[in-house]
Image (tube, helix red, strand yellow):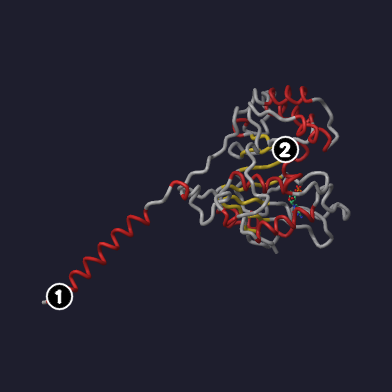
């Protein structure tokens, strides 16, 4: 009888401790609330501590953005576009008569894990069979003339965002978000003209309600902070990757890496010019930075074939 009573007391005590512990562990203090539902969330805590990983407040322009003289003076010379800051402001306000006042972005939600595939244009994608893995991510971000048709097994076939600049523009479908870079004043005029009503029968290049324009201050921040002013300015691909770190909770990177001659050759064409290298961009510094981000588990890098 004594033993039975002792066992009962022991059982009741253990149950009480379990119930109490369950309640305690379910309580999460406000400062420990997760910003996303991934295993690790970018910008969340020290587990991803990385010197340059600071969220830039406005990666995209909005109607009320105000570019500083310093940022403008950097931007106006990168492609020798010239112009004055008041011309710039006039051009930007004409763009915002045509696109939403704020970029159409999905904000982080504690219960969600927004994953991104950033797909560069490297030939290392050929024979990689990454297509299904790329398409599996929530956002598939392609760059410039990056295409799917004919390469689906290696590059996938979904495109949620196409990051591009004037010279690499292409016709997008109605659901793809155009992410537009400007490098000179003329590019702002280009955006206004492609988004203005087209002559009857001519299809618009983009769905203007989905357009996002990258903030020149963000481009300068990448050049100065991420790449320590190496090269003329960052490549569109590298800037797309840093953008992905801002709009996603988990980032997967494909199709980055020069060929054995050091050229940024493309998966859809033969190398046109052996001396193309990485243009005016700091290709080595960018690649080293991507490797460092992968090492610190800020992103997942796929080397290709
Ligand atoms: O050549 P393009 O600029 O259209 O390619 C998109 C981006 O993909 C580049 O800006 C570069 O960052 C990356 N790229 C690369 N290796 C290649 C080709 C492109 O890292 N062989």
* Left or right of residue 113: residue 150: right
Q: Are marks 1 and 2 in contact (CB under 8 Å)?
A: no
Is 247 placed left or right of 7 in the picture? Answer: right
Rate crowding at label 2 as few (under 14), some (14 to 19) or many (20 or more) other CA atoms within 10 Å: many
What residue is at 67 percent from the left and 56 percent from the top? 293
Q: Quadrant of the C terminus?
A: bottom right
- Compare marks 1 and 2 and give the one earlier in the sequence: 1
From the image, tell me which residue sits under label 1. 4
Between circles 1 and 2, the one closer to the viewer is 1
Dot 1: within a 10 Å radius of its alpha carbon, few (fewer than 14), some, or many (20 or more) residues?
few
Relative depth, front residue between 109 and 184: 109
The residue most toward the left is: 1
Q: Is mark 1 within 8 Å of ligand 1?
A: no
Q: Label 2 belongs to which residue?
A: 181
In the image, 168 versus 227, the foreground residue is 227
Q: Secondary structure at mark 2?
A: strand
Q: Position of residue 264 (x, y in %)?
A: 79, 54
Please state which of residues 88 and 158 is positioned toward the viewer in this rendering.
88
Label 1 residue SS: helix
Number of marks in the image? 2
Residue 141 position (above or below residue 194):
below
In the image, is the residue at mark 2 within 8 Å of ligand 1 by its beta carbon?
no
Of the 4 image quadrants, the one containing the N terminus is bottom left
Q: How far across and down, in percent of the image, does residue 25 sit? A: 37, 57
Q: What is the distance, in whole Å, between disc 1 and disc 2 at their CAs?
A: 77 Å
Disc on res. 255: none
In the shown orientation, is residue 80 left or right of residue 168?
right
The quarter holding residue 202 reads top right
Q: Residue at x 76, y 29 (%)?
A: 69
Relative image position of residue 173 (x, y in whole percent): 62, 38
Q: Position of residue 97 (x, y in %)?
A: 65, 22
């Amino acid at each position: 009888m004594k033993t039975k009573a002792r066992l009962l007391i022991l059982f009741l005590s253990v149950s009480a401790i379990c119930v109490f512990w369950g309640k305690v562990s379910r309580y999460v203090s406000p400062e420990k609330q997760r910003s996303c539902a991934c295993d690790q969330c970018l910008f969340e805590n020290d587990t991803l501590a990385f010197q340059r990983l600071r969220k830039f407040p406005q990666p995209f322009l909005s109607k009320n953005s105000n570019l500083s003289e310093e940022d403008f003076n950097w931007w106006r010379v990168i492609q020798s576009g010239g112009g004055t800051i008041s011309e710039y402001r006039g051009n930007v306000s004409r763009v915002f008569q045509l696109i939403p006042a704020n970029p159409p972005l999905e904000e982080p939600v504690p219960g969600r894990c927004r994953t991104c595939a950033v797909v560069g244009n490297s030939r290392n994608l050929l024979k990689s069979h990454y297509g299904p893995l790329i398409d599996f991510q929530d956002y598939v971000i392609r760059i410039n003339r990056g295409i799917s048709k004919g390469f689906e097994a290696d590059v996938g076939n979904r495109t949620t965002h196409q990051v591009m600049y004037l010279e690499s523009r292409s016709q997008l479908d109605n659901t793809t978000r155009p992410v537009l870079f400007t490098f000179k004043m003329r590019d702002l005029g280009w955006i206004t003209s492609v988004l203005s009503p087209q002559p009857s029968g001519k299809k618009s290049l983009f769905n203007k309600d989905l357009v996002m324009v990258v903030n020149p201050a963000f481009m300068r921040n990448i050049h100065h902070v991420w790449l320590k002013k190496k090269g003329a300015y960052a490549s569109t691909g590298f800037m797309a990757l840093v953008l992905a770190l801002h709009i996603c909770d988990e980032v997967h990177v494909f199709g980055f890496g020069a060929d054995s001659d050091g050229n940024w050759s493309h998966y859809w064409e033969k190398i046109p010019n052996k001396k193309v290298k990485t243009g005016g961009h700091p290709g080595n510094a960018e690649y080293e930075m991507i490797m460092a981000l992968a090492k610190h588990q800020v992103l997942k890098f796929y080397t290709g074939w």
